[in-house]
Structures are given as structure tokens and as C-alpha cells.
Amino acid sequence: MPKKKPFVLRLNPEMFERLEKWSADEFRSTNGQIEWILDQALKKAGRAKKETKPENPEE
């Protein structure tokens, strides 16, 4: 599994509170929720990493 890159994200307190609530409602950590939101946005924008297909289709 690739190493995750840490970075600072500044949010206003109200947004962070709403994000924490949403995370709890979906049984995710706040960090996991942010990753999920970003992943969904990348897919919607057509910028998600392409899945690699196996070279041998019989597998």
C-alpha cells in the first residue's frame, strides 16, 4: 500500500463541525470522509486513477 502524504487543511469551524457529523453518520473518521469526498469528486471529474486490467483475460 502506498504511503499517505500528510498535509495541512484549514477549514472554518462550522464546516469542520458539519464534516465531523457527516463522518459520524457514515461511520467514517473525519479524515476518511475527506478522502471519500475527494475520491468521489475525482471520479465525477474523470480524473480518478484508471483501473488496470489483467493481461491474461482467462484469469
Image (cartoon, grey):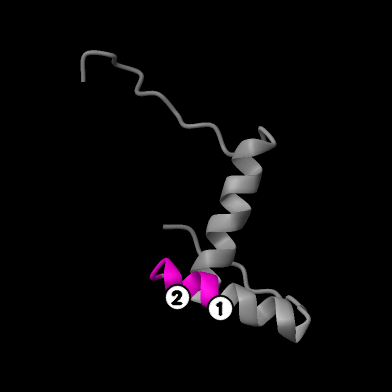
Main SS, magenta residues: helix
- Quadrant in which the N terminus appears: bottom left
Seen from the viewer's position, the closer of residues 6 and 17 is 17
| Vertical relation: 9 (above or below) 4 | below
Label 2: how many Cα within 10 Å (few below 14, some 14–19, many 20+): few
- Does the stretch in magenta take in 48? no
Q: CA distance from mark 1 to mark 2?
A: 6 Å
Quadrant in the rendering for residue 31: bottom right
Residue 48, percent across and down? 60, 39
Residue 5 visible in image: yes
Q: Residue at x 64, y 37 (%)?
A: 44
Q: Residue at x 53, y 57 (%)?
A: 36
Which residue is disc 1 drawn over? 20
Residue 21, percent across and down? 53, 77
Magenta residues span: 21-27
Mark 2: which secondary structure? helix
Residue kind at label 1, given as amino acid type: Glu
The answer to whether residue 1 is left or right of residue 9 is: left
Residue kind at label 2, given as amino acid type: Ala
Seen from the viewer's position, the closer of residues 17 and 43 is 17
- Contact, mark 1 vs mark 2 (Cβ under 8 Å): yes
Q: Residue at x 57, y 38 (%)?
A: 49
Which residue is disc 2 drawn over? 24
- Quadrant in which the C terminus appears: top left
